[in-house]
């Protein structure tokens, strides 16, 4: 699934549209550091670090599952911008996926 980045980016767009009930458009950063997903009321910056597969096990996890895991406890407000990324943690799986407001 992660072999084709365009497929993953489209799946993220579809997931946002299905879960927020709005039509999303996206554009890629020219340096491929993130993709910006924007609708009438929502804006998400999805970083390359959020999409990348770090381990063999990561390749088995659909991107929709990663989105659902990160967003299940997030309180998303209309009109704000959020960044989905990853951070290094001191746990058996050294990467944790996260979301943070940026505006």
Image (tube, rainbow, N blue to C red):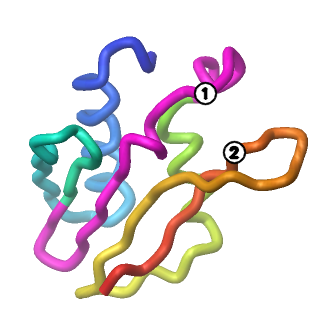
Q: Considering the numbered disc 1 on the image, is that residue within a helix, a strand or a loop?
A: loop
Quadrant placement of the C terminus: bottom left
Q: Which residue is disc 2 drawn over?
A: 95
Q: Position of residue 87 (x, y in %)?
A: 62, 55
What segment carries the magenta color? 38-61
Query: Considering only vertical position in the picture, is 80 above or below 99?
Result: below
- Residue at 22% x, 38% y: name it: 32
**Residue 91 shown left or right of residue 100 in the figure:** right
Left or right for 2, reference 79: right
Q: Is residue 58 magenta?
A: yes
The residue at the point 16 percent across, 64 percent down is 38
- Quarter of the image for the N terminus: give it: top left
Task: Please provide percent x and percent y for residue 100.
Answer: 48, 74
Q: Is residue 83 left or right of residue 22?
A: right
Residue 27 image offset from top left, x and y in percent: 10, 48
Q: Residues within 10 Å of mark 2 (few under 14, many from 20)?
A: some
Please tell me whether mark 2 sits on a helix, a strand or a loop: strand
| Residue to which mark 1 is pinned | 54
**Residue at horizontal 29%, vertical 77%?**
81
Front residue of 25/57: it is 57
Residues at marks 1 and 2 touching, judged by CB atoms closer than 8 Å: yes
**Left or right: 71 in relation to 20:** right
From this view, report whether residue 100 is shown above or below residue 4: below
Residue 96, numbered circle? none
Taking the view exactly as shown, the residue that stands out farthest to the right is: 92
Query: Tag 2 or tag 1, which sits nearer the N-term?
Result: 1
Residue 11 quadrant: top left
Q: Position of residue 7 (x, y in %)?
A: 28, 23
Residue 78: image quadrant is bottom left
Cα distance in 3D space between marks 1 and 2: 8 Å
User: How many badges with numbers are in the image?
Assistant: 2
């Amino acid at each position: 699934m992660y072999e084709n980045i365009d497929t993953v980016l489209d799946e993220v767009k579809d997931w946002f549209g299905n879960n927020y009930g709005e039509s999303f458009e996206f554009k890629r950063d020219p340096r491929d550091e993130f993709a910006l997903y924007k609708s009438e009321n929502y804006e998400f910056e999805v970083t390359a670090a959020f999409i990348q597969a770090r381990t063999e096990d990561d390749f088995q996890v659909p991107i929709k599952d990663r989105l659902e895991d990160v967003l299940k406890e997030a309180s998303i407000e209309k009109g704000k911008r959020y960044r989905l990324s990853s951070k290094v943690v001191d746990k058996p799986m050294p990467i944790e996926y996260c979301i943070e407001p940026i505006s």
